Image (spheres, helix red, strand yellow):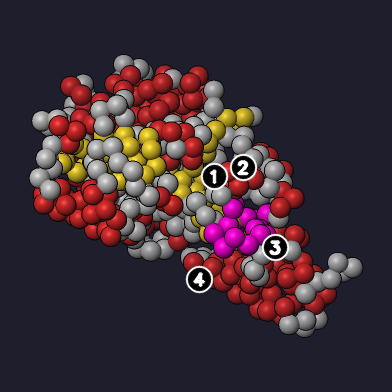
Amino acid sequence: MNWCGADMAVTVFVPADTTACALGADEVAVELAAQARVRGIDMQIVRNGSRGAFWLEPLVEVDTGDGRQAYGPVAVADVADLFDAGFPGTCSHGSSLGAIDEIPWLSRQQRLTFARAGVIDPLSLDDYRAHGGYAGLERALGMSRQQIVDEIKASGLRGRGGAAFPTGIKWQTVLNADGAQKYIACNADEGDSGTFADRLLMEADPFQLIEGMTIAGLAVGATQGYIYLRSEYPRARRVLERVIASARERGYLGQGICGTEEAFDIEIRLGAGAYICGEETSMLESLEGKRGLVRFKPPLPAIKGLFGQPTVVNNVLTLGAVSTVLAKGAKHYQDFGSGRSRGTLTVQLGGNVRRGGLVELAFGHRLRDVFEDFGGGTASRRPARAIMVGGPLGTYLPEMLWDTELDYEAFAAAGGMLGHGGVVVFDDTVDLAEQARFAMEFCAIESCGKCTPCRVGSVRGMEIIDRIKSNQQRTEQLALLDELCETMIDGSLCAMGGLTPYPVRSALQHFPEDFGIADSE
């Protein structure tokens, strides 16, 4: 039996990233292959990356020659029925979603960084090139270092790790700095709860990160790069090891990149499960083989970073965006976004939400649009009460702030932060006093211990919140908590302690009833 009577194998795509496999994608791929053999169908299964529509995983796609037809979520028990209904040809089945490009959840996004995610075989350099990969590097090889840096500046690209510092300014500092050796350090220690964009890019389009790091090396004169990878990402590690070896073999890494005199290589270093190593100086300490403790600044890493040399420290999404900027030009990238927030934001929808996953949109969309239009409301079907944006040290936003535009300045004006783009939804059963206490507890557990406001303040914060909840001198304890938060913000050595008060204060401000505070108080 041939598919649609054609004398050729049909290509079926089944994601192999962490989330899809946690939802059963490996087992579905095995069953698809088994059913095809039994039925005499010539089928090639490509393990692509997820498109980020995790609510549809495992998502199976069939290449029809005129586009891909999608089915999802597909369970192992559905596979035989799919074939009985005519799969992989045209078939009517309960999991049929039609043309993948016409699914509104995907078609309404503006994908730049994740344009290839779910489309290509992540391990194939040829597939990457066929879909525009390495066009940015090829262009960069014909430019001077300063021209590359100027292009990044003109694009308006800012760090996507949370701090939102202009990428081009950081690169300019490293380019101008004197150093016997310069480095590119990719922060892939994605530790914020509710975030997964770094992991998805590394598993779905890893060559993009390799290309972006190589361009960064060309721009500042660095010949060595390191990916500081979260140890809890074993699949990402295996993917990166394979694509780095492939890029090296094909002349895209190592000596004489693409036949030029330029050199750049990359090594992977694993973290050890410490949240604080997501902070750039603590990460550098860990890369040097030391305990992950925060460094005093100045000097900045751009002046004196890894092994005391000038170092570019960017996260995965920032470096991934670099390849797009160089391939399509700064003007193209800047055409997306609003105000000083240019390009796209990768929102990671999680928590109590019906349609969780990765949504890439130009800056400027409203938080409400993301939650309602893409998230589809709460998974519990209960009213949503709070949305936390920016990771475990972000702020809890009540409904009256959900019309805030997703850009850095608008969120700062609303007392919030975009951070790494994590968006976690809570329904009306949430206890915001407990969530505030969790922020202090999280800080106490994850603090490196180097500074007193963070190390001691977080423990005292838990104790004070406990007393407030049990109405022990509540007025005095509220004043003490406010003073403690001020001390942590102003006196902490890094953002770990400095940001911990943000979820606490937002919970107190917007949800005082959860702390036993009456409106009259």
Q: Report the front residue among 221 and 394.
A: 394
- The residue carrying mark 4 is 445
Q: Position of residue 353 (x, y in %)?
A: 54, 56
> How far across and how far down the image is residue 97, in percent?
39, 42
* Horizontal side of residue 128 vs 309, given as left or right: left
Name which residue type carries label 4. Ile
Mark 3 residue type: Ala
Q: Nearer the viewer, mark 3 or mark 4?
A: 3
Which label is found at residue 374? 1
Which one is closest to the eye, mark 1 or mark 4? 1
For residue 507, which numbered disc appears in the image? 3
Please say if 91 is above or below 168: below
Image x and y of residue 292, in percent: 41, 61
Amino acid type indicated by mark 2: Asp
Label located before the other in sequence (1 or 4): 1
Q: Is residue 448 visible?
A: yes
- Tell me the kind of residue under disc 1: Phe
Secondary structure at numbered mark 4: helix
Q: Is residue 435 left or right of residue 156?
A: right
Tell me whether the residue at label 1 lies in contact with that at label 2, contact meaning CB atoms closer than 8 angstroms: yes
Q: Nearer the viewer, mark 1 or mark 3?
A: 1
Badge 4 density bin: few <14, some 14–19, many ≥20, Cα 10 Å? some
